[in-house]
């Protein structure tokens, strides 16, 4: 196929991205801890030939445990279980550079890449929120800039560790009694402001060389980080214009850092609420909105704005005394997106909560399968997306609808694969396998 | 069954515990990274109704990569993959308290326990060796005592995190819109010399309450740690008398710490080399010894003794100028075991290397299935063991021989289960499920 191809990722989250999805009669409220539920989701996504499944993460209990199924299995563990239940689909886990050590994390991703036959991806996050910091001996969240500097060095160390075994290190020569050639396994002796790591890794080079690197921060620091390091970017964009602006900006930055902009794929989130008719889609959307308990969301919104909950009135617009993005220490770009959405559409707090309930700032789109396919194609054709991060409001039903009703339309239009053509996540995203940085010149795997 | 029952754990290690096993014609030298190899091993162990499989670990590339298949998948990842390939058998992963954060590690074990339906165990290690320290920003290994103090606090924090969700926290009340009762999910606010952790964990209480806690250090600090915290102890004992001494000492210590000694199970390692005749077993043992490359082992032995390799002569006994156990910073008890073995049997360095090649200090026993069953029963009946840590010299063949030839003899003697009678690892080991420390009085799961 020569037509430019869409990339589609299924963002998995318990029984759906809508915070009230667990209250629907169809939803199993214990599914968030049920490995069979996740295996089913991954198999549905694979049936649709999607590029990958993805898990968000933060090492903290988020918000009121009454609000939704909030306990979540650790993503590298959960994705390893999904590796055994699938054959092709990529497996992208979020993990924090602020609260991990590079040796441990690089090793887990290398292990997941080996176990899955080259299907691992890492969504690199610096982790916002003071409560996460307090789970790791800190009183406060480290400064935004400091976290991004650490993240950059963390990625640098990780790449050195993944490269510390040359691709041809293992010779398995039984006759000589040499399993791996010692001079093809490298001490890295990294020393930087944040890390000092001797190496080598105790896992040979992963099948993909490096797991696919993904990033999702859209602040200034986040965009620069993505432009330097990320191969795929998950982002929240509410309008086509915002999407085009972000897309152009990020591709520009990548080029300025000397990278090929085509090797930085941009995937905005979309929360499709799919009905066979528009009315059916809108009815599901409205039912979910009715099930939201506004008090939970009001407390969270107040925390985000550094207000006390009684400074927010559910039936009025946001107050004028909000902090600026500079005064916020984490999730900066999401903060700005939410404030702009509320101001632009003059939403009351209750209406804003309704709009955020589905995708926490990601764009919700209720419509028929053709309408969903149309909006995906429209953004794809107009310089706002290389693909989409699919965030079904309700799971598994929303993913089933997407795979069984929207994907065939995209396939018919020649925009999406009908069979997997490669074995690894890099193959699906059309990205090259990096060469090892310590390998002898002229040697390839 | 009222007869006291043996507990048997399969210690998995690439193509076998003997360092030269990979050089046998039958061995796949790439199996150490092949998930299908490990699934096969776990299924063989489950066919034999063994209690558990176990993976050793250290976050460091150990020794010369030429010597043996040394790259190893991270154990929580690998065991998650094995959880999906098995239904009953326990899954015990080694993880370091020196080079992890409690929030991350407690969460991974909780996740593994959920994914496996209550089959997770944690072998708690403090990690010896300066090279591991140098992968984590340190110049030197932290002192033995310091590592054990940190380990004790690490376990304390982990238990608080596992208990931070009461067993009945999740009510999933769709009508009220309450998923979990907020007052049954506890901030732990731990503050100690080594850790400050707010909590709660973001994973609800694991099926087993706590994963099974295992320990393998046999130094003074290690024994005290095991007696306070461990529910199963893996240990290296060369002779019945040493085994009896260790067994009595550890049970005594447990009682002194106010614990029921029957809830601390002691499993010495055994490297069975099984033949249908004694001659066949001895021939396999001799073939493995012939395949050892003595130079690799000599370098490692010299490092252990803080000597340079040329201070060791392959054809002489150990020199007199060895350090004492106090002068060794890691693996203290293994050091003493090796020196005592060499002195007692007046072994040359080459002979010592041959003896260590199979089990790195664990007892090697070459014999027929009946002889292996006899020695297991003899130790079990004479106060030296509650079961055994089975360390086949060659894998998978050595585990197959054990399961198909030795286990039936032990079953016939009424010493070992013929079917699993419980669902969890705690069930297999006959150990109780701990109550949550923050739960309201009178409430049980």
Image (tube, coloured by chain):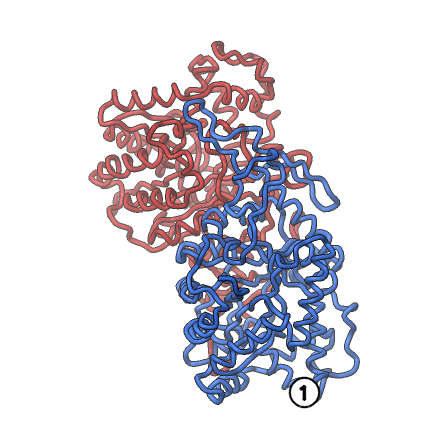
Chain colours: A red, B blue
Q: Residues within 10 Å of mark 1 (few under 14, many from 20)?
A: some
Question: Could you tell me which residue is drawn at 47 percent across and 26 percent down?
Answer: B178
Mark 1, chain letter? B
Q: Is residue A39 left or right of residue A206?
A: left
Q: Is residue B314 above or below residue A102?
A: below
Q: Is residue A149 above or below residue B267?
A: above
Q: Is residue B66 above or below residue B136?
A: below
Question: Could you tell me which residue is drawn at 33 percent across and 37 percent down?
Answer: A396
Q: Residue B159 location, x and y as percent?
A: 62, 45
Residue, disc 1: B348
Q: Residue A426 location, x and y as percent?
A: 39, 51
Seen from this angle, which residue lies furthest left?
A412
Tell me the SS state at disc 1.
Answer: loop
Q: Is residue A113 visible?
A: no
Q: Residue B256 location, x and y as percent?
A: 74, 56
Q: Is residue A246 left or right of residue A418?
A: right
Q: Quadrant of residue B44?
A: bottom left
Q: Quadrant of residue A7?
A: top left
């Amino acid at each position: 196929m020569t037509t430019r191809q869409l990339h589609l990722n299924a963002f998995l989250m318990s029984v759906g991205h809508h915070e009230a999805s667990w209250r629907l009669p169809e939803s199993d409220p214990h599914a968030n801890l049920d490995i069979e539920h996740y295996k089913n989701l991954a198999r549905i996504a694979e049936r649709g030939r999607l590029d990958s499944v993805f898990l968000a993460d933060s090492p903290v209990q988020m918000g009121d445990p009454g609000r939704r199924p909030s306990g979540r299995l650790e993503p590298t563990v959960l994705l390893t279980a999904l590796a055994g239940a699938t054959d092709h689909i990529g497996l992208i886990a979020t993990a924090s550079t602020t609260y991990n050590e590079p040796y441990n994390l690089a090793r887990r991703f290398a292990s997941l890449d080996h176990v899955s036959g080259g299907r691992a991806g890492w969504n690199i996050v610096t982790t916002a929120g003071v409560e996460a910091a307090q789970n790791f001996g800190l009183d406060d969240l480290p400064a935004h800039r400091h976290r991004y500097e650490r993240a950059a060095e963390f990625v640098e160390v990780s790449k050195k560790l993944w490269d510390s075994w040359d691709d041809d290190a293992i010779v398995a020569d039984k006759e000589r009694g040499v399993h791996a050639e010692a001079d093809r396994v490298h001490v890295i002796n990294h020393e930087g402001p944040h890390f000092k790591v001797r190496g080598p890794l105790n896992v040979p080079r992963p099948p993909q060389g490096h797991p696919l690197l993904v990033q999702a921060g859209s602040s200034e620091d986040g965009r620069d980080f993505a432009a330097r390091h990320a191969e795929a970017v998950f982002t929240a964009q509410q309008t086509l214009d915002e999407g085009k602006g972000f897309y152009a900006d990020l591709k520009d930055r990548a080029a300025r850092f000397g990278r090929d902009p085509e090797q930085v794929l941009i995937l905005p989130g979309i929360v499709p609420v799919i009905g066979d008719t528009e009315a059916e889609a809108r009815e599901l959307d409205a039912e979910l909105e009715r099930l939201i308990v506004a008090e939970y969301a009001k407390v969270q919104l107040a925390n985000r704005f550094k207000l006390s909950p009684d400074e927010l009135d559910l039936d009025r617009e946001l107050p004028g005394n909000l902090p600026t993005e500079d005064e916020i220490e984490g999730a900066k770009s999401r903060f700005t997106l939410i404030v702009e959405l509320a101001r632009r559409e003059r939403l009351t707090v209750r209406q804003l909560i309704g709009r955020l309930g589905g995708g926490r700032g990601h764009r919700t789109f209720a419509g028929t399968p053709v309408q969903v396919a149309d909006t995906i194609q429209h953004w794809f054709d107009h310089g706002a997306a290389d693909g989409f991060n699919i965030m079904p409001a309700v799971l598994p039903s929303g993913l089933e609808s997407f795979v069984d009703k929207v994907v065939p339309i995209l396939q018919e239009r020649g925009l999406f694969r009908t069979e997997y053509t490669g074995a690894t996540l890099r193959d699906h995203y059309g990205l090259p396998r990096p060469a090892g940085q310590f390998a002898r010149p002229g040697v390839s795997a």
